[in-house]
Image (spheres, grey):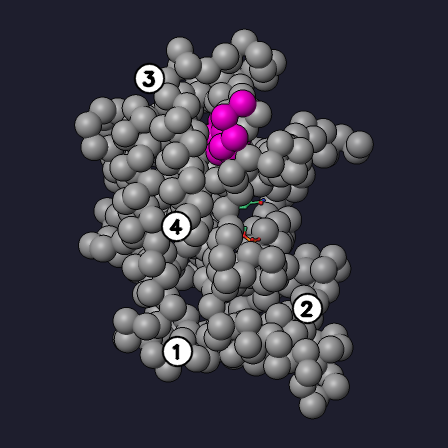
Amino acid sequence: LPNRLKGNEKSVWVEYIQLALQYKPLNLGQGFPDYYAPENVTNALAAVAKSANPLMQQYTRGFGHPRLVNAIAKFYSKLINRDLDPNKEVLVTAGAYEALYSSLQGHTNSGDEWIIIEPFFDCYVPMVQSAGGIPRYIALKPKSTSGTVTSGDWVFDRKEMEGLFNEKTKGIIINTPHNPIGKVFTLDELQFIADLAKKWNALVISDEVYEHIVYEPYKHIRIATLPGMYERTITIGSAGKTFSVTGWKIGWAYGPANLLYNLQVVHQNSVYTCTTPTQEAVAIGFELEMERLEQPDCYFRSLAMELLPKRDYMAKFLREVGMVPTIPEGGYFMLANWSALENKVKLHEETDENKDYRFTKWMTKNVGLQGIPPTAFYGPEHKTLAEDYVRYCFIKKDENLKAAAKILKRWV
Ligand code: PMP
Ligand code: GLN
């Protein structure tokens, strides 16, 4: 392995998906719906496969299929109240992953520092490091750990954040709504980060893949809309999350042309272009939803309404078995503290260094329920903060959530 990739050998997804295949637990691990995606997009994809236009099955424009970049530009122009140029201010990527990768490869010189908020979507760190950058960590910490804990209780220390910015800072990566906590960053928090980014002339990569999954009364705020921030922000989205089609692997980045240019250079020399039929279908999905944006049946609203009872049901059964869930304000993951159940788990039967890995592996093998160990989302220094937690995904059929409740209740 070349030096620049050393230290990045381990992936929680590779490991836990293999475990799930082997032990066949009820899978509340990896984040994906276990039920049908909305017909708007699946019908569109089926139609594209049989399209009268033979070019639908061939390469499309490298920086994004014209119909899709037009739809994305139109959609976000409305949301951020600024006219986006579909050809220069939007890039379609192979999932949000590639948007993150192209952003970090395209904007990192050796020794540049990126501020990363823990817990973080795990790929941020290997992406920063393989680009020659240095991750600087700051952890969200819960203000309280008993009673009703919500994702809003998890906050960063402002002095500590301030102290991380310096002349070597290239930028900060934020994720709102947040995976795995479900935190929806407040205007005040985003403004604080924005002011530091401006003060230190730093970039912001804003991972907003769960932008439409926000529970009332919380509101998703795009940091790119704060004064003076569009110029320094790359915002990232995902069709997988937006339309519940994680297997399609279509994502995008939008931002000012000069910043997106660097991503284009990475993209054109690696992925070059994304699949045409899925881009066409996602474009159709956007066009249809844009026509009914203000209506309750718009998927960008109905999805969160569909998930809310699932969230509440999960929180209830986790509490009933003695865990302390953090109620998420957005997204479809729930962090739960399982330390009250520690005496029921034979942690010594597993060999991993971190307790949450031992807990989740033991549960997968012996109880038949899979969750994700959240220390995977922390840098080396702060893993102990998350060892008593597990992450469960609740974008699952009601019957499977019920089955999960049953499995846990039978066990405790
Ligand atoms: N960012 C976050 C916070 C995620 O949870 C995910 C996982 N879907 C991604 C990025 C990657 O998204 P995609 O599947 O579109 O590559
Ligand atoms: N984003 C999803 C999650 O957090 C899937 C990530 C992955 O499979 N790499 O579970």
Residue 382 at x, y percent in the picture: 45, 22
Decide: few, some or many residues near mark 2? Use Cα within 10 Å; few <14, some 14-19, many ≥20.
many
116 with respect to 317 (left or right): right
Query: Which amino acid type is shown beneath numbered disc 4?
Result: Asp
Q: Which residue is mark 1?
A: 290
Separation (CA) of disc 4 from disc 2: 33 Å
Q: Which residue is mark 4?
A: 398
Q: N-terminal of the two: label 4 or label 1? A: 1
Residue 299 at x, y percent in the picture: 38, 68
Q: Residue at x 38, y 42 (%)?
A: 402
Separation (CA) of disc 4 from disc 1: 29 Å
Q: Which residue is mark 3?
A: 340
Q: Are marks 4 and 2 in contact (CB under 8 Å)?
A: no
Judged from the image, the secondary structure of the residue bearing numbered disc 4 is helix
Which residues fall within the magenta stretch?
366-376
Q: Is residue 26 magenta?
A: no
Question: Splitting the image into 4 quarters, where does residue 314 fall?
Answer: top left
Q: Depth check: give the residue in front, 130 or 311.
A: 311
Q: Which residue is mark 2?
A: 275
Query: Which amino acid type is shown beneath numbered disc 1?
Result: Met
3 or 4: mark nearer the eye: 4
Q: N-terminal of the two: label 3 or label 4? A: 3
Residue 179 at x, y percent in the picture: 43, 43
Q: Residue at x 30, y 52 (%)?
A: 308
Query: Which amino acid type is shown beneath numbered disc 2?
Result: Thr
Q: Residue at x 59, y 66 (%)?
A: 92
